[in-house]
Amino acid sequence: MKEYKPKIVCFLCKWCTSAGADLAGTSRLKYPASILPIRVMCSSRIDPMFVVKAFLNGADGVFIGGCHPGDCHYHEGNYHTRRRFAMLTKVFDTLGLDSKRLKLSWISASEGTKFAKVSNEYTEKIKSYGENPSKWNVFL
Amino acid sequence: MKRIGVFICHCGINIKGTIDVEKLTEELAEYPGVAYIENYIFMCSEPGQKLIRDTIVEHKLDGVVVAACSPTLHETTFQDALDEMNINRHQLEIANIREQCSWVHDDIEEATRKANLIIKTAVEKLKLNESLIPISAPLTKRVLIIGGGIAGIQAALDIADGGYEVILVEKEPSIGGHMIQLSETFPTLDCSQCIMTPKMVAVNKHKNIKLFANSEVESIEGFVGNFKVNIKRKPQYVDPDKCTICDDCTPVCPVVVPSEYDEGMSWRKAIYIPFPQSIPATFTIDTENCLGFNPIACTKCSDACEPDAIDYDKKPEYFEEEIGAVIVATGFDLYPVENMAEYGYGKYPDVLDGLQFERILSATGPTGGEMHRPSDGKVPKEIVFIQCSGSRDPERHLPYCSRICCMYTIKHAKLYKHKVHDGQPYIFYIDIRSGGKRYEEFVQQAVSEDGIVYFRGKVARIYKEADKMIVHGIDTLTSKKIEIKADMVVLAMGIKPNNSAEKVISNLKLNTDENGFLIEAHPKLRPVESLQSGFYLAGTAQGPKDIPDTVSQASAAAAKVLALLSNDEISHSPIVAIVNEELCSGCGICVSTCPYGARELDEIKKIATVNDVLCEGCGACISVCPSSAAQQKNLTDEQILNMVKIYSYL
Amino acid sequence: MNLPYYPGCTLKANAENFEDSAIKVMEILGYQLNEMKDWVCCGTVFSMTTDDLMLQLASIRNLLRAEEQNLNELVVLCSMCYNTLQRAKKFITEDEEHLNKVNDLMYKENILYEGTVDIVHLLTVLKDRITFDKIKEKVKKPLSSLKIGGYYGCLLVRPKEFAIDDFEDPSIIEDLFSSLGAESIAFPYRLECCGAYQTITKKDVTIKRTYEIINSARRAGCEALVTSCPLCAFNLDQRQKETAEEFIEFETMPVFYFTELMSVALGGGWDKSWSKMHYVDPRPILKEKRLI
Amino acid sequence: MSYEISRNIVRNELVGKIEELSGQNVFDCYQCGTCSAGCPVVEYMDIMPNQVMRLAQFGATEDLINSKTIWICSACLQCSTRCPKGIEVAKVMEALRSINLRKRVGTLDPNKIETEDLKDLPPIALVGAFRKLTG
């Protein structure tokens, strides 16, 4: 049987997590190719709709990475993200989507190791859940 | 539809090693919108860029995707290439297939598949990119420098000499930093104060430098070229204009506290001047210790002050200054001896740290430059220096090499020997790092001429017995366990970022590494810039370094600032928020979300607006907009959703 | 109040004075040391190889017995038992695989080992639960002018995760004896190894250790040492005989279990039978200070 | 005579065994010497604790297995607590002892304990010595 390879859409803020992912690369750390990056200026740019769409389109997991609380390049963007994420998990449950498949993590520009670690662990977790069942179910 | 050219870089084998670029080229050739696709060994090379320029003409391209390294490295390189061909620089997208793909995956098939998707997202984004021109903003030609040590002083003088105004903020009552505490400096043994004080005086006299001593930066707002800084000047309680520095006040002051300048080895009064050459040359009252602030007031100094310069009711003053750029030079502190369990937790008076020993060596120090130990004033005849105290110890202390300790220790040993001819210095070391210009010669000469004995190994323990410090060490070269009954021990403590700078650095949102040092924009190629534009780094705030390196870095930061200020205006990224007036209901959520005050309500049209110059382009206001009226230029909802689709379909 | 208590072999063989005095002292302080049932030897030394589960069984069996008896902690007097039990417990419980394997090895036991029993050294009980202030109040015969060096050895402070106090600069014994009215002296060699079981194969090593440790204490002004380890006590006390033979200028120094002197200070007195369990006669110094 | 080195020697099987049994990476050591400087019985050792780490780094396992050092070490853990790299040197010593003991090579012959001593020795000394020194 072919190994199940999940698709994980990752929204990475430019200043911290994307730079941290770059550092993971420069340090030649390894993580699965299931991690698919989209760079945004700030995690607060991420509209919950992007996440819902990703799931309905077939993504198996969505990862949001931002600066550590208090370290946001734009002062307070990640606080918006934190609240929005809390709300999003509720909405997910209400919609019948699986909020366990969402992940928010604070990874700074110097935490390449953390990026690789989170990527590995999160991919393993998503693998254990199997394919996203809500794929193609509804179109919003 | 746009005619997009895709250029895939091999980056030697960095990309090609794990990504099958030929297969990728083949697969993407048919992708909608891709008018031309090519792969090449080094896209960033001149031939690589020429390939792009030529292809733009030949294939009439109006957009380019370069699949290569992280955009932080070569985005501008390729944007400039587009500029040359009169194509708007925002018609370029970088697909990061190196740092976030080829370098982190091993499986060629999977990495190639992922690279394919990454490039497709870049193509999708580019399809909807608008051509934008930079927003120009005014440039305030003044510079803020935080920290008045040698780094801040050097940068201030360089910029001021270049003809621009400098605001120098120092938290202590005098500038000078740690360098003014040093006795003599390696490898030339010139007196630190002799080379430092002329620079301090120059700062004080320079017409372009405005000095705020005893002051702190409270906040900085704005963006490169247009910052506003709030400075708090703590009251000194002594009016510098009235004070004649007659020193009638200190003899009458009844409060005695350990002197910071002498690292606690001498005493000062609660009203004091930090050291004779202080700049600004004014007395200061230390409120924590002065009795004049307690309910039962003591007014002895005020009574003694003939010019009536003392005012206990003085309040902090606040200043707002406009500036265009900031240099952060907040310096270092020694790693505390109190953390060194096996060396007595700082309990033994004759176990000193490096700065305390500098004071003992210094002619202006507590012993007037004569070699006496703190406990009983005896001249130490057996003296042990221990390198790597607190450094290179990831398990319990600082993981890194503090870089300066090897050199300051050999200097200490040499200066000691000059003062105590019949004394014997011993140095415990793990490695001797003497990589600077004339450093190795200095070490070798000191060892040969002054008979300094190096032991290769670390000291496991120090304890006190009678009036001796018993040092248990090792010489790993001879496998001999060494025991020395020393009169004095000097710990070459490592250095860490300045304790009190932590607050200001976190207020400024500057990135620091795991040890608290400021992170430079690029470790090799942009060593004095911060990733935050408009912020520059100098001195030990960025990492351990000695005086020559600090001064070089300070001058480099000054050069970077001068280059910035030589522009007439500053260009601001056009990736800002935009409002669709037809959809906006004027609810104002965006206004409350924006951290920069860039969003305002237009009272007449009843809609929200964007002030382009103030907008930093974070996008927070866009995702809160309930009617999707707000969008981010070149990163619209539609663009992001198209990228999401590429990743999630299949 | 009752405290479940694990004695270990040596307290029943060569260090009865340690056990007797501890029980007496705790009674004075209002605690009953209740010896747990069915205990066996702890194994005395912790085996440090990663694959060695068999050698942990002795320790783990004791902890399993305690679980069977529904005890949630064990108070330990002997430093070696304290250290070995602590480390064995950690080694087995921190790794689920180890825990399962050990339970497999002990298949004849009635219950599975879970790791619920805490191991506490008596000194910690004195410091944290009874407190030195309370002990000070109960002092009947202050150890005034007695200059005491607290000898910790290795096992009370290393590995650092099981140190009963700061691992480089502890003060728990010094604080205890200050509260008993003695003059506590933190002498330099108080954390240095006594040579431990090398006393059997390399007597010369232990003799030299004893010589250095006792001399370090003497130079610092100590008149007597206190310890909580019967092996340290053996090496530092009994081996003074050979030490004196080896080094002619060597002067002996009495070595006590800390509980013996506590008993004297708290009014429990000095039991005559304890004297013969010391090589260096402790009575002269006690008489000199008018403590017996 | 020179000591000939090759990659097979540097990473020989026994080094792997030492690392496995001790749970330590011998390459973590940068030879600061703290372990030896603090060792209370180093004067009786033929190779110093830091040299144990050094020899393990280039695979001189013969020297380690046959050293007196490993039998002198009584696991007081001073080296382990002070190592700046967090290497538990005492565990490396234990691994080396174990490799010997598992081949029934030990240094304590119970029949040779002085009878005079036997009556006084506390059980912890005997059991400890048997467990650490007898194969």
Image (cartoon, coloured by chain):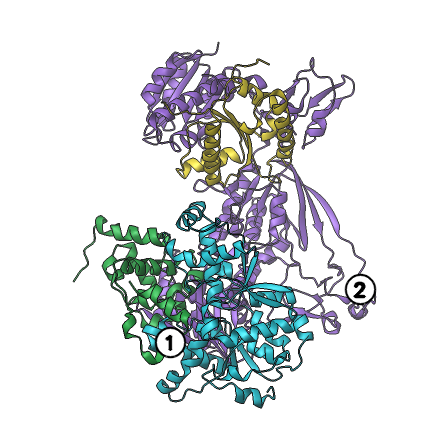
Chain colours: A yellow, B purple, C cyan, D green
Label 2 residue SS: loop
The amino acid type, in three-letter code, at marker 2 is: Asn
Q: Is residue D112 left or right of residue D78?
A: left
Depth check: give the residue in front, B489 or B111: B111
Q: Which mark is residue C206?
A: 1
Mark 1, other Cα within 10 Å: few <14 / some 14–19 / many ≥20: many
| D70 over A18 or under it: above or below | below
The amino acid type, in three-letter code, at marker 1 is: Thr
Q: Which mark is residue B294?
A: 2
In the image, farthest residue toward the top: B1
Q: Is residue C271 left or right of residue A117?
A: right
Mark 2, other Cα within 10 Å: few <14 / some 14–19 / many ≥20: few
The Cα–Cα distance between marks 1 and 2, rounded to whole angstroms, is 61 Å
User: Which chain is indicated by disc 1?
Assistant: C
Marks 1 & 2 on one chain: no
Q: Residue at x 34, y 77 (%)?
A: C203
Of the two numbered discs 1 and 2 in the rendering, the one whose residue sits closer to the viewer: 1
Tell me, yes or no, if residue B85 can be seen here. no
| Quarter of the view holding residue B486 | bottom left
Q: Is residue B22 left or right of residue B374?
A: left
- Quarter of the figure that contains the C terminus of chain D: bottom left
Residue D130 at x, y percent in the picture: 34, 66
| B465 over B315 or under it: above or below | below
User: Which chain is indicated by disc 2?
Assistant: B
Tell me, yes or no, if residue D75 can be seen here. yes
Q: Is residue B41 left or right of residue C103?
A: left
Residue D12 at x, y percent in the picture: 24, 50
Residue B633 at x, y percent in the picture: 58, 21
- Quarter of the figure that contains the N terminus of chain D: bottom left
Residue A91 at x, y percent in the picture: 63, 24
Label 1 residue SS: helix
Depth check: give the residue in front, C25 or C145: C25
